[in-house]
Structure formats: structure tokens, C-alpha cells
Amino acid sequence: MDIVLLGPPGSGKGTQGSLLAQELGCKRLSTGDLFRDIMKDEFHPLYPQVQVVNEGKLVSDEVVNLVVKDGIQKPSFQNGVIFDGYPRTIAQAEALDEILCEMGRKVDVVIDFEVSRDVLLYRLMGRLVCPNCKQVFHARQGIKRCTKCGSILVHRSDDNEEIIEKRLQEYKTKTAPLHEYYRSSSAVYITISIEDSSLSPEDVNRMILEKLKEKDVMLVK
């Protein structure tokens, strides 16, 4: 099963993508991880194209699409993909449809996280990240070191109100149009509304599974 997650920064796509991947036996796709893997291999055919990342330049849709197409050919993605943070534009969505069609697959489910501004600010401004294994925590947990690797947690410099507001505006401008694109597609489209900052990841995960059940989506691992 191939699932696209939509939602602004701080909506919980990464956390929920990881939970769903474990439950379904598929794999969450991170374009950042795909780029890093290619940049470690100078013999990779896409190595020259991804060097724009090191140069601090914007990555074109064309390059991102090539990286995704190359990545999901790997055996680890054979049982399905949780697309987190991709596609970000209509052009990328159209390219993904073509990529999956060539593989005899399609986007089966779209999960749209609608999270209130107050909850997003609460989550992002209190977010702590492990610099080593990238695990995410929140200041309310009172945890200073990563429970997975023991590294000291850090607060990202871009998790401040001014920058967060800019990122949310960018999301509305560039990514929000994907909602209508996927609503008019053949994919099962579900919306998860979150206005309570006290909801745990497990609470949200249950909401997702209940919605999928209502839509008669069979989640067989």
C-alpha cells in the first residue's frame, strides 16, 4: 500500500508515518535520507545532480523526482511506501503518479493532517531533537537525553515563532493545493483534525486507524 501524508510542519507526519510503517510492514520514505545516501556514493548515477544540496542551492522538482524514483526501486520499498514530505507540489504529485504507474502501483491513501495553529506552535516551539538518530521529543516530557542513543537533545534554531510562521505560509502557498489534487483522485482521502495539544501520538494513530476502517481500507501487514 502506498500512502501520502499531507500536513504543515509540526503536524506529526514523521511520527505517524513511522507508526504506520511498523503496523503495515512497509517503509517510510524520507527524501532527506535518500539524498544523504546518494551523496555518500560518488559512483551513484545521480551523484552529480544532488550536489546542489552541498552548494546550498534549491533542489528542482526534476532532481527530487529522480531521487524518489531511484529510491523506491529498492527492495525495502517493495511492500509499500509512506510518503512523508513528498510530494510538495502539484508537479511532484503528477510525477509520483507516473512513477508508481510504471511500477503497476498508485497512491492508495492520502492522510491529511489538519492541525490548529496553536497546536503547531506548541509542538514546534517545544520540540527537542536528537542530533544523532533524529528522534523527536517535546520539552513537556522533561527528557534531556535521547532514550534511543543517549545523545543530548537540542532545540532547532528554526523552531521559533517568526520562522515557523514563514514555514506555515510557505506550506499554504506551495503544498496546500495538493489537497484538491488528491481529493479529485482515486485515492482514499481522510482528514485528521487536531486541535488538542494533549493528544498523544498513540491517540492520533488510533484516530487514523478508525478513519481507515470507516473507509473500508484493509490494513493487512
Image: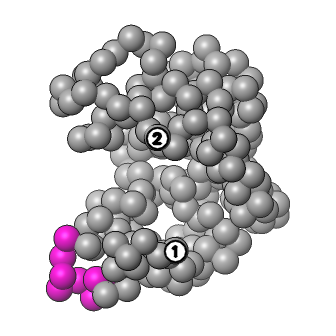
Q: Main secondary structure of the magenta part?
A: loop
Query: Who's the residue at 52% across and 24% down the image?
Result: 126
Q: Circle 2 is placed at which residue position? A: 157
Q: Secondary structure at mark 2?
A: loop
* Residue 46 percent across, percent down from the top left: 32, 84
Q: Amino acid at mark 2?
A: Ser
Is residue 213 in view? no
Query: Who's the residue at 67% across and 77% down the image?
Result: 91
The crowd level at tag 2 (other Cα within 10 Å; few <14, some 14-19, many 20+) is: few
Q: Secondary structure at mark 1?
A: loop
* Residue 64 percent across, percent down from the top left: 48, 75
Residue 42: say if magenta: yes
Magenta residues, start to end: 40-47
* Residue 120 percent across, percent down from the top left: 65, 32
Where is 33 relative to 156, above or below? below
Q: Residue 58 — which label?
A: 1
Query: Who's the residue at 26% across and 67% down the image?
Result: 37
